[in-house]
Amino acid sequence: MIDDQTRQVNSAAAPRAGSAQEQVNRLVEAVNALDTLLQDQLKDLRPRGMGLPRGSLEDVRAMRNYLKTLQTTLQFRQIELRQLRALADTTALITSALDTDTVLNQVMDNAIQLTGAERGYIMLRSTVDGELEFRVARGIDREQLTREDFTVSNTIVKEVMESGMPVLTDNAHSDPRYRERDSIVNHQLRSILAVPLTTGSDVIGVVYCDNRVLTGVFRDHELNLLQAFANQAAVAIRNARLFEAARAQLAEITEMRDLMANIFTSIASGVLSVDGEDRVVTVNRAACALLGLTETDAIGQTLHTLIPQIIERLAVDLQQVQESGVAAATEIEVRLDEGNLRSWNIIMTPLRGSPETIDGVVLLIDDLTETKARAAQLAEVQRYLPLALVQNLRSDALAALGGQEREITILSADVRGFSTFSEKLEPEQVMEVINQYLTAASDSINLFDGVVDKYLGDEVNGLFNTQLNPQDNHAERAVRAALFMLYEVSELHESLPEDHALFYGVGIHTGVAVLGNVGSQERREFTALGDAVETGKWLQKHAKRDEVIISPTTYDQVKDIFVCEPMTPPEAHPTIDVMYLVKGIKRRQ
């Protein structure tokens, strides 16, 4: 029996390859076997009055206790080594990620794993308002906990955030620092570990871990481990935040660049920028169209190469802008590639690299050719159109001034008794009086958006539904203008001597006429030509004073609005066998 035990001791104590932990474990086994052997030998020796050498058992037991202590120390060191290796691996992992949420989730998982905590969460200081905000949380199963189920101790988190120092308590209920706090008592927090996330001197957040059941879960070792990990994690979080901020800024800059490019492309004016050597740096679509170039052809070329026939007239201004930094403007007429003569307005402003430096010039080119042509046409029609109509004219109406056939209503008004009246007065008096009557007639036509055609002595003609004043109810407007004209003349009589009282006779006809500008290059007038004009004058000739006579075609369009009395023409007309005397406006039922 003793021989077997001796062999067992010798076998356990024999040197073999393996880790230090395995060797210590074998030594522990050998000492335990030796202790058992010595105790058995002591039992055999005592009946014979003998014993073991003094202190042999005590030495063996002291060695066993030492080896057990060594065994425990080696186990702890191996756990610490595994944690440090895990720390290195996880640090490399989180520092390789650039998404803040991904980094935070990895940090939280690794903190739980390194400390053996039941649960934990991370709070970060907001980059917007500086307030603390929850970013990620874990429970015992490492899954996100709902906010209602998640209890925290804001007291400790705020303390760590303000002081920048970690907090460790292995039993919060008995810790005099926290046992009176509601969050500790109500939520039964026992082991608590919280460390700051610090970059440089700034505390950007807190990693918090706790255990609601066990005490003594966290020691200085876990504190040091988590603090070392948190220092690396803080750098990773800061880098991820910086990357996201840079990415957001880049996206904003890209969006702004695209917006500016779209605006630059959409500008109707030609925009062209040149550097200090007059080489084109940027050019928009409108400038390319004006110059007859493509962007590829223009970029990098000098203005002398691109537009030699223009740059000669701009050279002095360009030089002054570059030297003085003061904008300049000029208007020139150009003819490109044997095309039509164009009128350009060019504004030159300094292109500044900084408030103190001028890197080039920006040219803003506006083609005023069509604008000037329209202005000339408007100036022409303004002589026979009210200002309100002139301002509302469309370009197609101006283009049709060359001639257009359309249905119109013509109003022809003539002063009755003027020949006899003019014989009694001096020429100056005659002109003064007749102009008052013509003004009353013109104002009446303009009031209903008619076009004053022309004045023939004491006669005035008005046109409705021309290309300059298109109207669906042109016949009604003409009749209303005529009735208002008679009213205006009666009002005028109140301010004139009795012997100056004159009266209008008005004829109105609706028919097709040709309308447009007639005359020479030096003088043109807008007028109507055709049988419709002659018919209107024929009706006017048969209208007595204060009478408005209309044709059947006009009557057909206004018979539901005005009271009209049919009349037999005093003389034959090719197209009119009845005419109508307007008596007034019908009352609405």
Image (cartoon, helix red, strand yellow):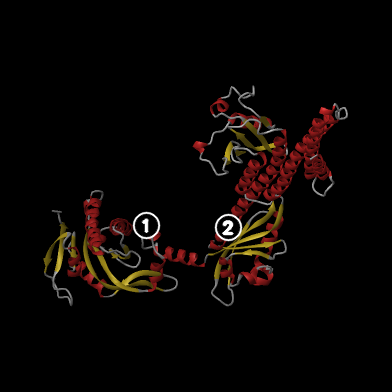
Residue 115 in sight in this render: yes
Q: Residue 482 got which mark?
A: none
**Between disc 2 and disc 1, whose residue precedes?**
2
Place of residue 338 in the rendered image (x, y in percent of width and height, measured from the top left): 57, 77
Q: Quadrant of residue 192?
A: top right
Tell me the amino acid under the disc marked 1.
Ala
Q: Which residue is mark 2?
A: 260
Q: CA distance from mark 2 to mark 1?
A: 38 Å
Taking the view exactly as shown, the residue that stands out farthest to the right is 53
Quarter placement of the N terminus: top right
Q: Is residue 501 left or right of residue 569?
A: right
Q: Position of residue 407 (x, y in %)?
A: 27, 71
Which residue occupies 56% across, 63% down? 265
Give the residue at mark 1. Answer: 388
Q: Is residue 474 shown left or right of residue 96?
A: left
Which element type, helix, strand or loop, lies under badge 1? helix
How packed mark 1 is, by other alpha carbons closer than 10 Å (few <14, some 14-19, many 20 or more), is few
Residue 26 % position (x, y): 79, 43
Q: Is residue 521 left or right of residue 178?
A: left
Q: For residue 273, what is the image quadrant?
A: bottom right
